[in-house]
Image (cartoon, rainbow, N blue to C red):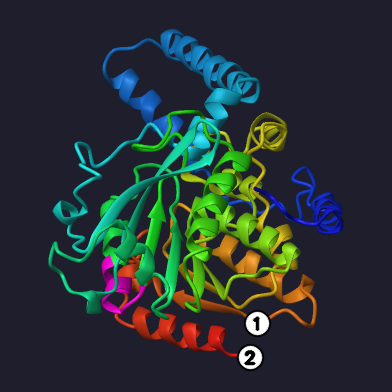
Amino acid sequence: ENTMPSKLKEKIANHAKKFKPKLVLSKLRQEGPAGARRLVWLLVAFILYYRGWSVFSIITLYLELAVFLFIALPFVFKYTPWIQRNLVFLPFVKWPKNVDFNNPAAEGLPATRNFYLESEPGIKIGVWHILPKSTGDGDQVGDESSFEEQLGDDKTIILYLHGNSAHRAGPHRVELYQVLRSMDYHIICCDYRGYADSTQVAPNETGVVTDARAVYDWVLARSGNSKVIVWGHSLGTGVASHLVADLCLEGTSPCGLVLESPFNNIFDEVRNHPMAWVWRKMPWFDWFFTTSLAQNDLGFVSDQRITVIDCPVLILHAEDDAVVPFKLGKALHECALHNRGETCRAVEFKEFSGELGYAHKYICRAPELPQIVRDFEIRCCRDHD
């Protein structure tokens, strides 16, 4: 039952009005190699001509393609919220397949419990609780109540919020869980609505943040004196930023926030995503592809929400990230540096050289990551930077 005082509700509502997904703070755009699109079209035309196509047939084909690519598809995207939600969240990409979520040990995660929470009436979400390494690797690690009791053992708890596509058993996610488990942390990870074994309804920003909040509240009710750090990756950084901003406005900030491979806002992410390469330079790109996202509850604006986040923040980003370009993480960091209050804790930015090949998913393989996280945990324990 929600017992939040009415004055606090009013304060949160007033602050929430300041978050305007339609008000985009920046318009960053990845230009790419000059003339690359023209070169591709010319190369295809040359191949078709070489294979016996007439010039008239090639021109006709290109006109048909132009109508389809630059008129039909953009209009379908703009006026079909279902397509927008599926392209932003990619919940239909269920890989790897045939995962038995009730048997996490088969995925390389011993001492792990699978369970389900109701985030709101009719919505069930799948959750894993991975115990710290010190509890052992055997199957006999305790029953349900034992797992919950151990959340209050003073070991740090990481609430991990994944990005789009796949599910909580994704290989790169499991790699990160294993790193964090070896550091003797509890890891709580979940699948939002629409993903994996959670209730199959179309996700949106409000829905996935509601799911994340339900898991956070469940953890907090059992954590005792244990520290809780929220960790988001990729699209999950938008979920994490929204969740933690709400918590900060309520005066119940978590101990810290980790943003791995984050974007500043969903609009810049769409402009710079590899899938947008074909359309990026077309007139009215934003009218077709970004303005309707906010109207359909997909307006993740981490650069606005981070302005009210007062707990310590750690940003991790690889220079060779092709999915969420490095410059978007830098833009989020710059926004945090220049738009947060003096009482807010510091935002730390850790970059990883593109030569290391970590790209979008594999910062978890950085040998220095455990020390970076441990140092951040120590900073979270202090009441000053």
Magenta stretch containing residue 182, yes or no?
A: yes
Where residue 93 appears, x then y in whole percent? 35, 35
Where residue 350 appears, x then y in whole percent? 49, 78
In the picture provided, is 363 more to the left or to the right than 33? left
Could you say which disc has been placed on residue 385 in the image? 2
The correct choice, above or below, for 26 with respect to 331 in the image is above
Mark 2 closeness class: few <14, some 14–19, many ≥20 residues within 10 Å: few
- Residue under the image location 49 percent in, 88 percent down: 378
Amino acid type, label 1: Ala
- Residue under the image location 53 percent in, 60 percent down: 262
User: Which residue in the structure is indicated by mark 1?
Assistant: 346
In the picture provided, is 242 more to the left or to the right than 373? right
- Residue under the image location 46 percent in, 88 percent down: 375
Where residue 157 appears, x then y in whole percent? 43, 71
* Rendered-image quadrant of the C terminus: bottom right
Q: Quadrant of residue 78?
A: top right
Amino acid type, label 2: Asp
> In the image shown, does 184 or 337 lie closer to the viewer?
184
- Residue under the image location 53 percent in, 46 percent down: 211
Question: In the rendered structure, which disc, 1 or 2, sits on the residue that comes first in sequence?
Answer: 1
Where residue 160 appears, x then y in whole percent? 43, 60
State the extent of the magenta-drawn residues as a range: 178-185
